Image: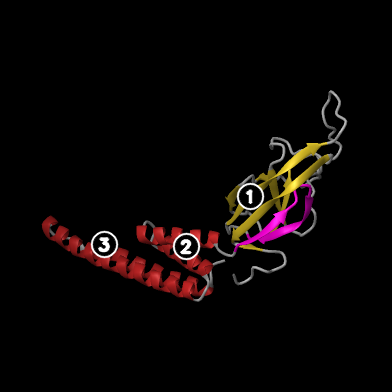
Amino acid sequence: MIQPSILRTMSFCCLLAISVSLVPVTFAQGQPAAARNKDLTKIDAKAAKVDELFIRNAFDIAAEYEKAGDVARAVDYLHAMSLIKPGLAKIEARLQQLREQVLAANDFTFEFEPATNWGKPVAFVRSGKPFKINVQGGYKLAISALVGADGLAEEDIQSDLIDDVPLGKLVGVIVEKPNRPSLKGEEKIVPFEIGTGRVMEPRQDGYLFLKVNMPPQSKTSGSLQVQLSGYVLAPDGENIGN
């Protein structure tokens, strides 16, 4: 959600942009082509100065947010400014830099046991706010089950292999409540693949759960080190303010 102060700034800048856009319409009527071109050149120069002032002010305010320790709000502010004046390369470049800072910040790491079958939520994430997952380490996997010609039984889809996902790959789901997710029923939740890592932008607020795609008869040794960063909050709140 865009902050109220940012919305007020957007309203002022919108009025400024409208007033600037009306200048050539009222000024250029009924003039010779040469004089009109000369006047338009002057107006273009004025417009360029307005753009520079716009960029400088936007950078100054974003820098104040950064100095206050809220890089995420700096991103929201510059994004709002980019909607008012789209196509300004300097703002887009700075916005990208700040987004990368956010994805690298607020990080926390934990050890994940591959044998965990969803278990407890590992983080809370927000709709439209990107976060990054980085996974390292490895483990040994052994399946101890009597398998017939039909293959492994599919009696419980929640604990069996997930279709079209490689055996042993790390997957995740985001659900609204911190309860163990169910992959069956009317509102079936579809897991997303993670593997060694990815950047995600959730479509909803919710709790992140992790699981390795393997049948319940599996035995594992070893663990995975999972690092989360960006717009993400540990369930225990330990990374608040980092």
* Cα–Cα gap, marks 1 and 2: 25 Å
Question: Which secondary structure is most common in the magenta stretch?
Answer: strand
Per the rendered image, the range of residues in magenta is 107-126
Reading the chain from its start, which is encountered first: label 1 or label 2?
Answer: 2
**Foreground of the two, 6 or 131:** 131
Q: Residue at x 59, y 60 (%)?
A: 229
What secondary structure is found at the residue carrying circle 2? helix
Dot in front, 1 or 2: 1
Q: Residues within 10 Å of mark 3 (few under 14, many from 20)?
A: few
Q: Residues within 10 Å of mark 2 (few under 14, many from 20)?
A: many
What secondary structure is found at the residue carrying circle 3? helix
Inspect the image, locate mark 3, and give the three-letter code of the amino acid beneath it. Answer: Val
**Foreground of the two, 122 or 174:** 122
Q: Is residue 167 visible to us here?
A: yes
Give yes or no for contact between labels 1 and 3 (Cβ–Cβ under 8 Å). Answer: no
Name the residue at the top extreme. Answer: 149
Where residue 212 appears, as percent x and y from the top left, is 73, 45
Q: Which mark is residue 166?
A: none
Residue on which disc 2 sits = 98
Which quadrant: the C terminus? bottom right
What secondary structure is found at the residue carrying circle 1? strand
166 lies above or below 28: above
Q: Which mark is residue 136?
A: 1
Inspect the image, locate mark 1, and give the three-letter code of the amino acid beneath it. Answer: Gln
